[in-house]
Image (cartoon, rainbow, N blue to C red):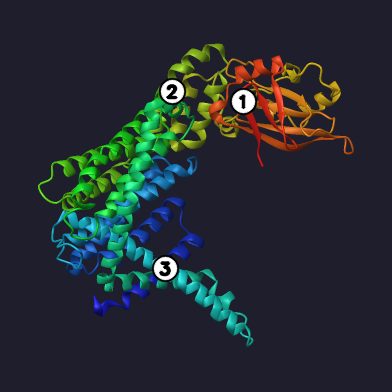
C-alpha cells in the first residue's frame, strides 16, 4: 500500500468533487441522483478500507459489488416507498442500516483476508471482528479530525494574508467546488494515517476498553436501581407513559451491551474485572435481556392499540435483535470453555455478522418499515371504516389515522387510501384534504359558551371573556373535543400576581396551561406565562371537580403557581 499513498488524497478530492456536483448541479432525476450518491459514498468507504487487502481484482470486485448493492437498495426503497411523503425516521433508518451492513461487510473482508496487526491473531477469527470494527471507527474519527484541523488552519492563514492585502482567498476557498475537494483530501489523509499507523490504534483501543470497563458497572448499577423501583411499584408509571418509553428502555439494554462491546475489544487478559469481579459481572448480564423484553412489551401495547408505525417497526426489529444478542452473550459468558473476554469477543463477532444481515434485511422490498406499517394500518382501519362509513361521517380519530397514512407512509399509504376510496367513496375525504389536515385537530372548534368558567363569581366582564375565547384562545378551542364530542377545556379566572386584577388560565387536555392578562392600556389580552403540570399528576376529571369546589390555592411568586386539589401547576421559568 506504500506505493499507493498518493491515491488516498487524490481519491478524497475526487469523491468530494463528485458529492458537490451531484448535490448542486447534477442533471438527473431524484431516483438516479440519490442512488448515485449512495454508490459514491459506498465506493469511497470500500476503496479506502477494502482495496489493498487481498489481490487487486478481488478487492475491486468486492468494492463494486457492495457499492452497487447499496445503491440498488436505495433505489428499491424509492420505487416501492418513495421519499416524498415519509418522515425522517425511515430515511434516517435506511442510512444508518446501510452504514452498519456496509461497514461490517468491509470489516469481515479485512479480517478474513490475511493476518494483520491487531491485538489478536485474526486470520478467519470471528473474535477479531470486534477490534477491526473499532479500528475502522477510529480511522473514520481521524478523518473527521483532519477536517476539523484543516479548516481552522485555512481560516487563520487567510486571515493573516488579508493583513497584507490578499482578501479574496477565503472567498475562493469557501466555494463548493474548492471546499468539497479540500475536505475530501483532508478526510482521506486522516484515514490513510490511521491505516498506516495501525499499531498506534492498539493503545487507543485499549484506553477505550479500560474506560468502558469502568463505565459498565456504573451503568449496570443504574439499571439495577431502575428494575428495583419498577418491581416496587414503578411499573404502572412506566406503562402509563404516552410515548417513547420503549426507545428509552431498549436504549438502556443496547447501551449496556455496547459498553461491554467496547470493554472486550482490546487486551489479552484472562478476566475483565478480576476473578471475583467476573462472577458478579456474569450475573449482571441478565439485565439487558430483561430490558429488551420490557421494550418489546411496551411496543406491543402501542401496536395492539394503534397498529404499526415506522418507528415502532424499527423498535421491534431492534428490540428483538438486542434480546437475542444479549441472551447469546449471557450463554457465552456462563457456558464458556475459554476465558471470559475471549468467549465474549467470539460471541460479539457472530453477533456483528448477524447485525449486518439484519440491517440489510430490514430494508428489503416489502419488508421495509414503511410498507409493513401501511399494511398494519390498512388492516386496522378496514374494520373501522366499515363500521363508520354507513353514517357518512368518519370519527376524528379515524380521519387523523388516514391523514397519518397520507403524509407519513409514502406510496404504500397512498395505495391503501386509494383502496379505501374505492370501497367507501361517499365517506372518504380526498387525498389533498387528508394531507392538509392538522393531526392534532380533534374536530370542529367547540363553541365558546360550552367552555366552563371558574369561579362563577369572577370579576372579569363577560364581554372580555368572550373576547378572550374568540381571540387568543380561538386556536386552542380546536383541541377541546374528545372523540365523543364532549368538552375538555375550562377557564380559571384568578389573581395570580396580587394586583387586584384576575388573570385567565386556560386548561386543555394537556400538561400545560397558558396564562393571559387583560392589558387595559392596549385593550387586548396578552400572554404572560405558561403553567406546567407533571404528566404523572394529570387527572382531568379530578381537576374539574376541584375547580367546581373552589379548591384552588395561589403559590408565590408573581404569576404564581397554582395548586388545584392535589395537582401542582408550576410556572415555566
Q: Which residue is mark 1?
A: 567
Q: CA distance from mark 1 to mark 2?
A: 29 Å
Residue displayed at 46% across by 57% down: 28
Marks 3 and 1, the one that precedes in the sequence: 3
Left-right relation of 289 to 339: right
Marks 3 and 2, the one that precedes in the sequence: 3
Left-right relation of 350 to 485: left
Mark 2 nearby-residue class (10 Å; few <14, some 14–19, many ≥20): few
Looking at the image, is mark 1 or mark 2 nearer the viewer? Answer: 1
**In what quadrant of the picture does the C terminus appear?**
top right
Q: Position of residue 135 (x, y in %)?
A: 28, 63
Question: Which disc, if any, is residue 145?
Answer: 3
Question: Which disc, if any, is residue 305?
Answer: 2
- Secondary structure beneath disc 2? helix
* Residue placed most toward the observer, 100 or 430: 100
Residue 563 seen:
yes
Amino acid at each position: 500500500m506504500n506505493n499507493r499513498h498518493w491515491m488516498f488524497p487524490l481519491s478524497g478530492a475526487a469523491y468530494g468533487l463528485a458529492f458537490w456536483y451531484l448535490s448542486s448541479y447534477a442533471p438527473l432525476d431524484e431516483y438516479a441522483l440519490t442512488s448515485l450518491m449512495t454508490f459514491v459514498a459506498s465506493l469511497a468507504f470500500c476503496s479506502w478500507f477494502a482495496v489493498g487487502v487481498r489481490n487487486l481484482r478481488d478487492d475491486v470486485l468486492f468494492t463494486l459489488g457492495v457499492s452497487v448493492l447499496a445503491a440498488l437498495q436505495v433505489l428499491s426503497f424509492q420505487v416501492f416507498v418513495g421519499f416524498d411523503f415519509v418522515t425522517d425516521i425511515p430515511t434516517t433508518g435506511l442510512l444508518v442500516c446501510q452504514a452498519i451492513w456496509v461497514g461490517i461487510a468491509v470489516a469481515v473482508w479485512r479480517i478474513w483476508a490475511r493476518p494483520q496487526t491487531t491485538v489478536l491473531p485474526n486470520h478467519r477469527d470471528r473474535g477479531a471482528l470486534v477490534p477491526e470494527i473499532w479500528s475502522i471507527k477510529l480511522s473514520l474519527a481521524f478523518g473527521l479530525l483532519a477536517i476539523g484541523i484543516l479548516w481552522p488552519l485555512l481560516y487563520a492563514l487567510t486571515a493573516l494574508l488579508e493583513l497584507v492585502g490578499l482578501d479574496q482567498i477565503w472567498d475562493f476557498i469557501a466555494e463548493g467546488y474548492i471546499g468539497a475537494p479540500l475536505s475530501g483530501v483532508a478526510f482521506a489523509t486522516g484515514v490513510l494515517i490511521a491505516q498506516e499507523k495501525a499499531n498506534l490504534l492498539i493503545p487507543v483501543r485499549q484506553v477505550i476498553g479500560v474506560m468502558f470497563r469502568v463505565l459498565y458497572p456504573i451503568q449496570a448499577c443504574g439499571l439495577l436501581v431502575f428494575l428495583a423501583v419498577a418491581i416496587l411499584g414503578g411499573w404502572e408509571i412506566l406503562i402509563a407513559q404516552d410515548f417513547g418509553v420503549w426507545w428509552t428502555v431498549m436504549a438502556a439494554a443496547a447501551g449496556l451491551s455496547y459498553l461491554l462491546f467496547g470493554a472486550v475489544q482490546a487486551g489479552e487478559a484472562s478476566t475483565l474485572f478480576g476473578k471475583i469481579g467476573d462472577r458478579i459481572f456474569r450475573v449482571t448480564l441478565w439485565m439487558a435481556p430483561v430490558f429488551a423484553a420490557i421494550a418489546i412489551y411496551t411496543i406491543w401495547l402501542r401496536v395492539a392499540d394503534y397498529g404499526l408505525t415506522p418507528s415502532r417497526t424499527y423498535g421491534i426489529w431492534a428490540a428483538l435483535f438486542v434480546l437475542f444478542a444479549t441472551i447469546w452473550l449471557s450463554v457465552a459468558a456462563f457456558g464458556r470453555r475459554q476465558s471470559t473476554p475471549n468467549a465474549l469477543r467470539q460471541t460479539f463477532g457472530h453477533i456483528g455478522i448477524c447485525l449486518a444481515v439484519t440491517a440489510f434485511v430490514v430494508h428489503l422490498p416489502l419488508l421495509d418499515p414503511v410498507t409493513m406499517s401501511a399494511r398494519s394500518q390498512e388492516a386496522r382501519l378496514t374494520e373501522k371504516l366499515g363500521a363508520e362509513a354507513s353514517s357518512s361521517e368518519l370519527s376524528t380519530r379515524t380521519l387523523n389515522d388516514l391523514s397519518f397514512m397520507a403524509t407519513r407512509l409514502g406510496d404504500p399509504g397512498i395505495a391503501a387510501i386509494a383502496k379505501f376510496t374505492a370501497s367507501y367513496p361517499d365517506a372518504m375525504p380526498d387525498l389533498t384534504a387528508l394531507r392538509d389536515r392538522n393531526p392534532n385537530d380533534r374536530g370542529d372548534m367547540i363553541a365558546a359558551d360550552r367552555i366552563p368558567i371558574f369561579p362563577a363569581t369572577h370579576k372579569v366582564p363577560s364581554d372580555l371573556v368572550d373576547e378572550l375565547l374568540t381571540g387568543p384562545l380561538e386556536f386552542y378551542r380546536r383541541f377541546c373535543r374528545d372523540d365523543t364530542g364532549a368538552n375538555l377545556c375550562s377557564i380559571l379566572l384568578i389573581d395570580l400576581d396580587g394586583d387586584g386584577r384576575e388573570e385567565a388560565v386556560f386548561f386543555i387536555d394537556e400538561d400545560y396551561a397558558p396564562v393571559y392578562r387583560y392589558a387595559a392600556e392596549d385593550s387586548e389580552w396578552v400572554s404572560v406565562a405558561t403553567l406546567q403540570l407533571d404528566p404523572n399528576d394529570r387527572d382531568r376529571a379530578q381537576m374539574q371537580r376541584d375547580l367546581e369546589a373552589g379548591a384552588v390555592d395561589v403559590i408565590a411568586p408573581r404569576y404564581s403557581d397554582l395548586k388545584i386539589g392535589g395537582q401542582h401547576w408550576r410556572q415555566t421559568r
